[in-house]
Amino acid sequence: MAGMTYKMVAAAIRQGTFSNVYYFYGADVVQVQQLTQLLCQKATGGNPEMALTKLEGETLDVQQLREQVQLFPMLAPYNCIWIHDFQAEKCREEAFRQLMDLLSELGEQTIVVFDVTGFDLKNGRKTVSGKNKKLLDCIGKHGVVCEMPMRSTAVLAKELSGTAARRGCTLPRESAEELVRLCMGDTLKMQNELEKLCAYAATEPVSIELVRTMVTPTPETTTFALAKAVVSLQTKTAMEELDRLYAMRTSRTFLVHTLMAAFLDLYRASAAFHSRRTPEQMKEDFGYTLDFVVSNAFRDCRRIAPERLRQCIAILRDLEYQLNATACEERIAVETAIVKMLAAAAGTGRSRSYDFN
């Protein structure tokens, strides 16, 4: 069964209604982990040490899996096999065919669960294609497929406040939303940071200032801050944010691609704004999940004309080519590109025609 929600699958598991094979995936890593652990706990009758086998997807051996699924459960209702982060694209054709056949003929007392968390963390969704899509479709015919996409800022913030309250800590809505923003919606990181904040705040409410002081910024949030500094013509801030990215040992590929994504967000927001579209409509048009990504882009795009944004995007495209196709000093090339973008944003850069095809 495909298209089942987290709540639907969790309710069925708690009621003792099981399928023989499950595929849990999505950007919400915490929900993927929670549902997988719930299934393994219930399917083994609370005795996972007796009837649970965990296999790493990266090194999955189909013959080993075949041997595991043929075992009978001991002191448990089901023999449960948990396969973590399996990427079907890396599987050889013959092994993949054997895996598909195996999953279509599982015994009644066997449960196989795939938990896959390697999906897009920015927009909460990634198109599943190729062998991964074939595997997902196969499991959908014989079992349960459940995607856990990234949830909205408001939902995540409400959940964080509730978690804090259960720990005896007060996390106001504004602080919770700032935590979501700084963690870019990464649910696992949010939980870890919340634990740190609650321990520090003790009985005091967690202020937004405390969140900003204690939460370690992600490379994504730092890159977005760099983009904001460029469109705001803040040269010193832009270079400081770049220093932070290099201190985090951010790869050049990640840096350029994330910075490109930030400027594409700004360009989309600019196009929407000049077309009299609302942030809500932009969110729907482009499939954004995180509200603050759209609202921040709408706020910052008004600082710069659309044609100047196009120039910045083209500069980043040229930078990517330079880094990948020529011998150059990476840091100097990146800094030069940022200076060019600052000039373009200010309207002092050299005008040129850009072809995005």
Image (spheres, rainbow, N blue to C red):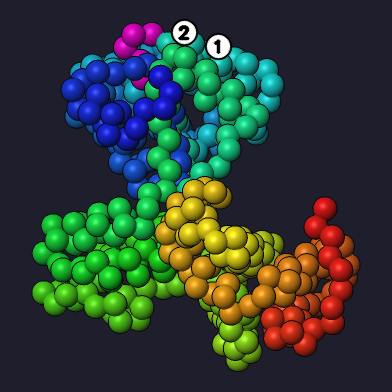
| Residue 258 among those drawn in magenta | no
Task: Judge left or right: residue 135 versus residue 190.
Answer: right
Q: Which span of residues is magenta-colored?
A: 107-112
Q: Position of residue 119 (x, y in %)?
A: 52, 44
Task: Judge left or right: residue 238 versus residue 83.
Answer: right
| In the image, residue 45 above or below residue 58 | above
Q: Report the residue at 57% width, 75% height from top.
A: 302
| Residue identifier under label 2 | 105
Residue 310 at least partly seen: yes
- The secondary structure type at the circle numbered 1 is helix
Q: Nearer the viewer, residue 235 or 295?
A: 295
| In the image, residue 189 above or below residue 10 | below
Q: Quadrant of residue 319?
A: bottom right
Q: Real-space Cα distance between discs 1 and 2?
A: 7 Å
Mark 1 and mark 2 in contact? Answer it, CB < 8 Å: yes
The amino acid type found where label 1 is placed reads: Asp
Extreme-front residue of the structure:
276
Q: Residues within 10 Å of mark 1 (few under 14, many from 20)?
A: few
Q: Quadrant of residue 290?
A: bottom left
Q: Report the residue at 59% width, 23% height from top.
A: 134
Q: Position of residue 297 (x, y in %)?
A: 53, 68
| Residue identifier under label 1 | 101
Q: Position of residue 342 (x, y in %)?
A: 70, 84
Residue 88 at least partly seen: no
Q: Report the residue at 21% width, 61% height from top.
A: 161
Q: Quadrant of residue 243?
A: bottom right
Q: Position of residue 256 (x, y in %)?
A: 68, 66
